[in-house]
């Protein structure tokens, strides 16, 4: 999924993006994560994808930690 946003303003090194076309939903993100030279009024695309491999790794890690906690008793 790709979100098209407008860089509305920058406040204390935080960029406030408005999701287009309605521009009623706000996303706050550190300015350092935006492309160099981004400025107010720029249109930016945000790609959101699900990382299945990392999700599975996180589930396994949590499951392992829970097992260790259960076995301590």
Image (cartoon, rainbow, N blue to C red):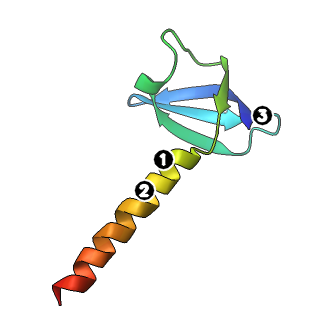
Give the Cα distance between marks 3 and 2: 32 Å
The residue nearer to you, when weighing 42 against 56, is: 56
- Residue drawn at (41%, 62%) of the image: 60
Q: Quadrant of the C terminus?
A: bottom left
Q: Quadrant of the N terminus?
A: top right
Q: Nearer the viewer, mark 1 or mark 3?
A: 1
* Mark 2–mark 1 CB contact (< 8 Å): yes
Give above or below for 39 relative to 12.
above
* Mark 3–mark 2 CB contact (< 8 Å): no
Q: Tell me: 38 left or right of 30.
A: right
The residue at which mark 1 appears reads as 54
Give above or below for 36 relative to 63.
above
Residue 31 tag number: none
Residue 6, how many percent across, how many down? Answer: 68, 26
Give the Cα distance between marks 2 and 1: 6 Å
State the image quarter where residue 45 is shown. top right
Q: Residues within 10 Å of mark 2 (few under 14, many from 20)?
A: few
- Residue drawn at (17%, 84%) of the image: 72
Could you tell me which secondary element the residue under label 1 belongs to? helix
What residue occupies the far bottom of the structure in this picture?
73
State the image quarter where residue 22 is shown. top right
Residue 33, how many percent across, how many down? Answer: 45, 26
Give above or below for 72 relative to 17.
below
Residue 3, how many percent across, how many down? Answer: 72, 34
Give the Cα distance between marks 1 and 3: 29 Å
Could you tell me which secondary element the residue under label 2 belongs to? helix
Residue 58 tag number: 2
Q: Residues within 10 Å of mark 1 (few under 14, many from 20)?
A: few
The residue at which mark 3 appears reads as 20
Could you tell me which secondary element the residue under label 3 belongs to? loop
Sequence-wise, the earlier of marks 3 and 2 is 3
């Amino acid at each position: 999924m790709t979100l098209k946003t407008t860089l509305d303003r920058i406040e204390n090194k935080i960029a406030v993006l408005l999701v287009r076309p309605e521009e009623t939903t706000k996303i706050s993100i550190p300015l350092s994560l935006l492309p160099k030279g981004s400025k107010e009024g720029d249109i930016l695309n945000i790609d959101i994808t699900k990382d299945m491999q990392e999700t599975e790794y996180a589930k396994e890690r949590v499951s392992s930690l829970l097992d260790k906690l259960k076995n301590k008793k």
